Amino acid sequence: MFRDIPYLDLVTDEPQGAIDYLCDRLAFVPAASAADADRRALALRNGPVTIVVSSPVGTGGPIARHLDRHGAGIIDIPMTSTDLDADVRTLVRAGTPMLPASPGVAVAAGFGPVVHTLLPTGAAPLPPGLEWTSLPEPAVARGALDVQALDHIAVCLPGGTLQQTADHYASAFGLPRYSSEYIEVGAQAMDSVVVRSPSGAITFTLIEPDLSHEPGQIDEFLDRHSGAGVQHLAFLVDDIVTAVRQGRDAGIAFLTPPGVYYETLLERVTSLSDRIEDLRDTGVLADCDEWGYLLQIFTRSPYPRRTLFYELIQRNDARGFGSANIRALYEAVERERQRESARSR
């Protein structure tokens, strides 16, 4: 059984920019470094979340080729296993392609170019096969953003592949379906399925465009990334309003909801009447389900091809994913897409 995600491997040909963004704006701190013939890597941590920023050595290796085709983004989403041999047998029976791996671990194909390094529970939360050097804790913290967990990973898939991919993650990886949502915005539409591990620590929001509608932002991501890939990472925080204000001061550019969003918000989330002005000031979105409410906000992508962005999410007992906010996010990203298109003309 797969339990959690020990780290994420982010590849980029502009490592210092990616490191500065994660450290100076999202308060990650360097934890370890490594290098081999193909790449240089720096592991950054904020609370329980580790992101390894990898960059190519030279121009002919696998990471350089990946970046040429797909741009900066997540290349590996590892998972820890309580019984690695049994889980690998299940993956093979389900038809999952297995790739060459270091001794004691396995590597399974995921979606698009993304793979899953499979580690036994208790293994070091760093990519295997590299000689890692631990770095000292910084004397002064980078910022006050305390990440509590990796809440979920949003994945864009080509149209027509969503159901098959969700079924495969359920049968092969033991991540059953948790929820689903269909969203229509103007002439565009998207469908989504959430799959989640029994532990609750591995959650993928799988998204595809509805090909019977006009192309939109999901199609553009697939074009920019040359296929399926990770659209955004969602970090769980305990005080999103403070986090956004500090992030804004540090230079994070957040997506903003439509101006009328807050005029109708209290009709959906009546318990937030005393927080509405803070939410309006920060651009934070809110939604509720039968268990509670959640607050969330999304950054603009800091990467040249806009192949990855980030979400901050605060949960007050809510278990959903802000289904009423998907439309607001979609519209905000659409406005950003149109601005980028106008600037490029």
Image (cartoon, rainbow, N blue to C red):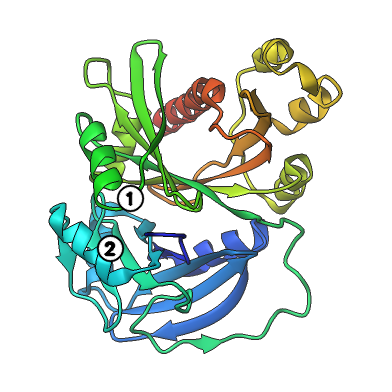
Q: Amino acid at mark 2?
A: Asp
x, y percent for residue 146: 71, 57
Residue located 40% across and 67% down the image: 82
Q: Secondary structure at mark 2?
A: helix
Q: Which residue is mark 1?
A: 174
On-image quarter of the N terminus = bottom left
Q: Residue at x 40, y 79 (%)?
A: 40
Q: Residue at x 63, y 48 (%)?
A: 236
In this view of the protein, which residue sits in the foreground, 231 or 115? 115
Three-letter code, disc 1: Gly
Write the residue at 52% across / 63% down.
17
What numbered label is drawn on residue 87? Answer: 2
Report the number of discs: 2
Question: Is residue 235 among the parts visible in the rendering?
Answer: yes
Looking at this view, is 89 or 61 the one in front?
Answer: 89
Q: Nearer the viewer, residue 101 or 209?
A: 101
- Taking the image as drawn, is residue 306 in sight? no
The correct choice, above or below, for 313 with respect to 216 in the image is: below
**Residue 317 against residue 289 in the figure, above or below:** below
Separation of marks 2 and 1 at Cα, in angstroms? 9 Å
Label 2, residues with CA under 10 Å away: few <14, some 14-19, many ≥20: some
Residue 219: quadrant of the picture: top left
- Percent position (x, y) of residue 265? 69, 16
- Local packing at callout 1 (Cα closer than 10 Å; few below 14, some 14-19, many 20+) is many
Report if the CB atoms under discs 2 and 1 are less than 8 Å apart: yes
Using the image, determine if residue 325 lies above or below residue 105. Answer: above
The answer to whether residue 133 is left or right of residue 68 is right
Secondary structure of the residue carrying tag 1 is loop
* Residue 323 vs residue 72, the one in the foreground: 323
